[in-house]
Image (cartoon, rainbow, N blue to C red):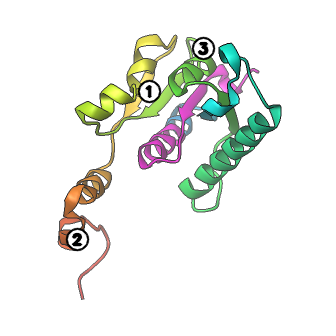
Amino acid sequence: MQTAGGRRVVVGVSGSLGSLAALHRAVAEVRGAGGELWVVLAWEAPPAELGPRGAVGSTSLSQDCRRAAVHELLGTVERAFGGGQPGVPTECFVARGMPGQALVGVADRENDLLVVGTGHRGLLHRALFPSVARYCVAHAACPVLTVPPSPLQRTLETAGRGRGLRLDLGELERPGVSEV
């Protein structure tokens, strides 16, 4: 598919705060340089779907998983823009496969830009779950823009690690909000 200006900005989303930040950055890239936004959510078959020797089992289960992925993708775009649209030419896709491989497979042209969010990951998390961003940087045929988490996300993650009950709301920067 040829896009306006021939440029695609492909962004991977998962519904996480990091992927929402990446989505907003991808929209800014399209607004600045033109082209078309391709929003991609990757999904994998659950282990129960794989039969003997990895053969695919129930197509009904596969279809249900795909429908759930479509629902999550559309919900993520809706949440990211407050129920509206990004305001740039946009296509939404679900891709079956591991996230890094799926994103690199979609962003397969030299003039594409692949945008992915990064997250704060501890050693255990890194060992158990490979980094999508690292995979994309190592394997993509196009430039990859990695978007770090926002300071608010860092604060929320810190709060979730045992400080949640003691989080002082004064620690959060709230632009445009005055104390009463």
Closer to the eye: label 3 or 1: 1
| Residue drawn at point x = 69 percent, y = 38 percent | 92
Residue 39 position in % (x across, y down): 62, 37
The residue pinned by badge 3 equals 108
The residue pinned by badge 2 equals 165
How many marks do you count on the picture?
3
Q: Could you say which is closer to the camera, residue 50 or residue 32? A: 50
Q: Secondary structure at mark 3?
A: loop
Q: Is residue 15 magenta?
A: yes
Closer to the eye: label 2 or 3: 2
| Residue drawn at point x = 51 percent, y = 42 percent | 23
Q: Could you say which is closer to the camera, residue 98 or residue 26? A: 98
- 154 in relation to 126, above or below: below
Q: Give neighbour class at mark 3: few <14, some 14-19, many 20+ (Cα, 10 Å).
A: some
Residue 170 seen by the camera: yes
The magenta span reads 1-28
